[in-house]
Each structure stands twice: as structure tokens, then as C-alpha cells.
Image: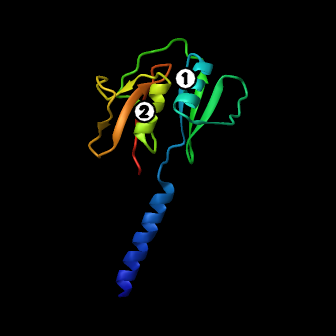
Amino acid sequence: MTRKSLVIILLSFIGTTVFAQSKTKANHVAIFVKDLKKSAAFYKDVIQLEVIPEPFHDNKHVWFRTGEHTQLHVIEGAAAIEQHDINTHYSYSVPDLAVFSKHLDEMHVKYGNWKGNSKSPQLRPDGVKQIYLQDPDNFWIEINDDKF
């Protein structure tokens, strides 16, 4: 290996390492809801997220773990429940979409494909199966089987 090749490889490695360390990462999503108890129960029992400690201790916040280093912050105080377009949604992946869909059926939670005309999962262009549902404040949620 020539010295020039070694320098190019070293500079490439340093550049890649610096980029990876400075890359923006998700931390949390916060949603403003009308009824905290109802929304917290939905995310705990329907979506099956883990409740984690929150620093406010004011009965207006419930925090959930959504990933190794990501969270959902549910905050009470919205004056009304608004309609939201399905194009604005957040997404969670589950190990088995059929098992999760059965759980939704048992909980009597409405869900469906993007158009809302079928409960059958649809296939995204990247091959991931997905369904959509809404929380008590009409926020849209995609549930998929992405294995990333």
C-alpha cells in the first residue's frame, strides 16, 4: 500500500467517523392532548409503550420509551381535539404486524391501510407492511414491520 493510499483511507475514515458522531438523531416527539388519562392509556395499552419517569410530576405529562434513546412526551392542555391529515404521522415498528393487528382487533381499535378502505396491511415501496390508526386526539400513527 502506498503512502498516498494510506492517507486517503485514513482521511476517509476520519471524515466518516466525524460525520457519524455529529449526525442529527431523533430524541423525542411531544404531542399536546386534551385528555391525558385517555391518551396515556392508549399509548400504554394499545400501542404498548413503556411509561418512563418524567421530571415535571405535575399530572400534565406522561413520557413513554419509543426506542433505545427516543421518547414520546404526552402533554395535557389542548383546548380541543383537532382533525389531522394522515400525511402528518409518526411511526412505530413491531416484530409481527399480524399479531399487533390481532391485538388492535381485541382492543376494538379502528385501523386500516392508507386509504382507510381495508384492514389489510399495505406494502410500502420498500417492501415494509404498514397499517394506520389514530390516537384519541386524532394524531395518525403508522405501525409497520420494518426490521431495519
Q: Tell me if 71 is positioned left or right of 101 in this view.
A: right
Q: Which structural element holds mark 2?
A: helix
> Mark 1 — residue?
32
Query: For residue 129, what is the image quadrant?
Result: top left
Q: Could you say which disc has been placed on residue 125 in the image? A: none
Counting from the top left corner in percent of width and height, residue 137 is at 49, 19
Q: Tell me if 22 is positioned left or right of 146 in this view.
A: right
In this rendered view, identify the residue nearer to me: 105 or 136.
105
Residue located at (48% from left, 23% from top):
135
Q: Amino acid at mark 1?
A: Phe
Marker count (numbered): 2
Q: Nearer the viewer, mark 1 or mark 2?
A: 2
How crowded pointer 2 is (Cα within 10 Å; few <14, some 14-19, many 20+) is rated as many
Counting from the top left corner in percent of width and height, residue 71 is at 57, 39
> Mark 2 — residue?
101
For the residues labelled 1 and 2, the Cα–Cα distance comes to 26 Å
In this rendered view, identify the residue nearer to me: 51 or 30.
51
Residue located at (63% from left, 29% from top):
62
Counting from the top left corner in percent of width and height, residue 109 is at 46, 23
Residue located at (46% from left, 42% from top):
94
Q: Residue furthest right?
A: 57
Query: For residue 55, what is the image quadrant?
Result: top right
Q: Tell me if 11 is positioned left or right of 41 in this view.
A: left
Q: Earlier in the sequence, mark 1 or mark 2?
A: 1
